[in-house]
Every structure is written in structure tokens, then in C-alpha cells.
Image: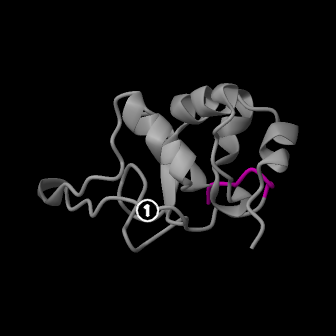
Amino acid sequence: MEQNALGTDLEPCCTDPETGYLRDGHCRHLDADRGRHEICAVMTADFLEFSKANGNDLTTPRPEYDFPGLDPGDHWCVCLGRWVEAEDAGVAPPVVLEATSEAVLDVIPFSTLLDKEYET
């Protein structure tokens, strides 16, 4: 089984709506996923606005893709590159470490993720 950023079994990020490249609820590392949807993030208004302003509107429903649109508080597998851009801009959303692929550690230091850990 794939490991999470904590080195334990990868847990689901969200199943309602279903997220992940495979829409199976998991933020997996997959060679076919060029966007690297590997970070389980908890949406914030600031991040959603940032993403929309940078070409990826995650708030508007897209029924043709079975996508309901996201609201602050929703969990979603975000692209590694977009999360890093948001972090650089000071608007990165909190991260659910148990549901974030350990593969992101090749780009993001664990300490950065830990600083952004979602507190339940």
C-alpha cells in the first residue's frame, strides 16, 4: 500500500465529493498524473480565490465532470505545483498529512508540511 507523508498507510482524503486523480478518494502518486494530485488539502477562501485567479476554478460546479464545486472546509487532492505556488504566495491551504502522499516529500520539506498540518 502507498505511504503517506508520515510514513504510514495512505488514508482517504475525501469521498464526498470523490477526489484524487482516479476519483477514488485518495491523493496517490501515479506516473500518469502529470499534475501530481498528491496533497490532501482543506480548502480555504484564500486558496480557492488564488487558484481561480491562476487558471483553476475549483468553486464552479462542472456537472459534465461530476464536479460539484468546492467550498472552504472541503477536503481535496490538489496539484503539488499549485500548492507550492500558493505557499510561496502565503495562501497555501492546510494539509491532512495522513492523506497526503509521501511522494510530495521529494519537493516539499516535511517541516513545511508539518507547519501547514490541518488541526482537527
> Which residue is farthest right?
111
Is 110 displayed left or right of 39 in the figure?
Answer: right
Q: Residue at 77%, 61% (x, y): give it.
A: 8
Q: Nearer the viewer, residue 23 or 50?
A: 50
From this view, report whether residue 90 is shown above or below residue 70. above
Pointer 1: what residue? 71
Kindly identify the amino acid type of the residue bearing the numbered disc 1.
Asp
Is 94 displayed left or right of 41 in the figure?
Answer: right
Q: Position of residue 16 (x, y in %)?
A: 39, 74
> On the image, which quarter does residue 99 sit in?
bottom right
Is any part of residue 28 visible from this angle? no
Q: Residue at 56%, 54% (x, y): give it.
A: 44
Q: Nearer the viewer, residue 94 or 9?
A: 94
Is any part of residue 14 visible from this angle? yes
Q: Position of residue 17 (x, y in %)?
A: 37, 69
Q: Residue at 81%, 33% (x, y): give it.
A: 109
Is 92 within the magenta?
A: no
Q: Residue at 64%, 53% (x, y): give it.
A: 100
Give the position of the N terminus as an image quadrant. Answer: bottom right
Is 39 displayed left or right of 106 in the figure?
Answer: left
Q: Magenta region, mostly helix, strand or loop?
A: loop
Give, as a single range, the part of the protein colored magenta: 1-7
What count of labels does the image hold?
Answer: 1
Q: Position of residue 61 (x, y in %)?
A: 23, 58
> On the image, which quarter does residue 108 sit in?
top right
Q: Position of residue 41 (x, y in %)?
A: 59, 54
Is 3 within the magenta?
A: yes
